[in-house]
Amino acid sequence: MTSPSAPRSAAGRLRAALRSSPPLAWSFLYFFCLLSGYYVLRPVREAMGASADVEALFPAGMIAFFAAHGVPLKDFTLQVLFTCTFLIMVLLQPVYGALVSRYPRRVFLPGVYGFFIATLLLFYVLFDSGVPGRGMAFFLWVTVFNLFAVAVFWSFMADVFSNAQARSYYGYIGAAGTLGAFLGPVLTRVLVERIGIAHLMLVSAGFLAVCVVCVLRLRLWAVAREQEGQLSSGEVPMGGDVLGGLKLIVREPLLRWLAFMVLFGVGVGTLLYNEQAALVRRLYTDAAAATAYYSSIDLAINALALVLQLLVTRALLSRFGIAPALLIPGVAIMLGYAALAASPLPMMIAIVQVITRSSEFALAKPARETLYTRVNREWRYKAGAAIDTVVYRGGDLTFVWVHKLVSAFGSSAVFGVGLVVATGMTVGAFGLLRQARKLPVERDVETDKRVSE
């Protein structure tokens, strides 16, 4: 029975939770600023990826190389960008592994965000300089920034919160990110024509600076939780193999199923993304108009995600566990792709895009992240990051070329393949749930012994 004094509205429950839990409040601010900073830049990246002006995107030497081999680069823009992104992720994996292995949490977490702030300042200087290839460099950098910065965030959250707290709080934390994702496109639409694209880099850098402050504050609660629960400390270097994350994915069944689900989930999004980009190229020739279109889609996605996060996510995770949150998106996406295969209209593509991404943000992502509170730090920081970067972009690379092959047969063929891919994602969710039942309910028994040993 509900207490008479308990807040009844979703907003009231959120305010009460933020007041009663300082680490939740700092985590809320952290994720809000992180996604605000990213979503200020995302519409710019999307407009570049959908641009038909290859001279503004790629270096002249690269365009000449493709032309010399009889390949028009404008016909393979996204395929080339996604291939380069995947290669960068593979090259960065041992660098990230070395960082988390050799440095304690108090060093590598601020270091990651400090690096991204420094590169944003560099892009601010270069953006209007006319340097060839800066558009491609920015597209690749924003993609890397999003994956690594968010992966590090969720790994850190599993240091701060227990599994029970995660199931109660991750919906609210996700809502903070959604609010940031609301603010980012709004700022972009308001500012891009007033201050120019280059100055948006400074806006994003300011948000990331606040993230560093949040990391330093939240570290205190992470240390306290580790000491109280006698868990392995993040205040000492983790050690282990710099490629330990990839090796864990190969060896551990739960991580394999998690990677399988993420791979096919990315495939669903990539096929839809490419069809949407083709539509934008046909309908919008102006970069500012394309940026505004993508901003509108992002706002719709985040509106639905926020409603789900405030009204649904916490109830599902707290009362029923992760199963509904993992399975509902898969079923919804299967239905959406079936509708698109029958009727691939532009409005229907936009609707399915909104459903696909909002259900991922509000349901599937928080459900997957709660699993990391029940495993040790090497699984979280190394394997988790490998799944969110290498596996994620490997899925992008695979399915962007699948789209290139299948799109020759029309949109209905693309969405028919997408239905099969969505089915694979749902199968992955079932496999992950079977393995999750073998994990301890809480991380009370975590030891200092690393899984890779």
Image: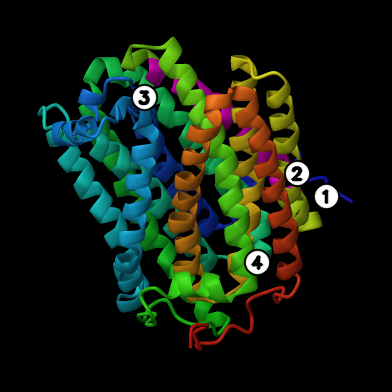
* Residue 313 covered by magenta stretch: yes
Q: Which residue is mark 2?
A: 328
Tag 2 or tag 3, which sits nearer the N-term?
3
Dot placed on the residue nearer the N-terminal end, 1 or 4: 1
Q: Amino acid at mark 3?
A: Ala
Q: Is residue 204 above or below residue 451?
A: above
- The residue lying at 46 percent from left, 25 percent from top is 277
**Type of residue at label 4?**
Asn
Label 3 with label 2: CB-CB less than 8 Å: no
Within 10 angstroms of label 2, few (less than 14), some, or many (20 or more) residues? some
Q: Which of the 4 image quarters holds residue 60?
A: top left
* Mark 1 vs 2, N-terminal side: 1
- Which residue was labeled with disc 1? 3
Residue beneath disc 3:
47
Frontmost residue, 53 versus 237: 53
Query: Could you give the CA–CA distance between mark 1 and mark 3, rounded to whole angstroms?
Result: 50 Å
Q: Secondary structure at mark 4?
A: helix
**Nearer to us: label 1 or label 2:** 2
Estimate the x, y position of residue 270 in percent, counting from the top left: 52, 38
Amino acid type for the residue under numbered disc 1? Ser
Q: CA distance from mark 1 to mark 2?
A: 31 Å
Query: Range of the magenta residues?
Result: 290-315
Residue 34 visible, this angle: yes
> Which residue bears the numbered disc 4?
163
SS label for mark 2: helix
Q: Residue flagged by tag 2: what amino acid is it?
A: Ile
Earlier sequence position, callout 2 versus callout 4: 4
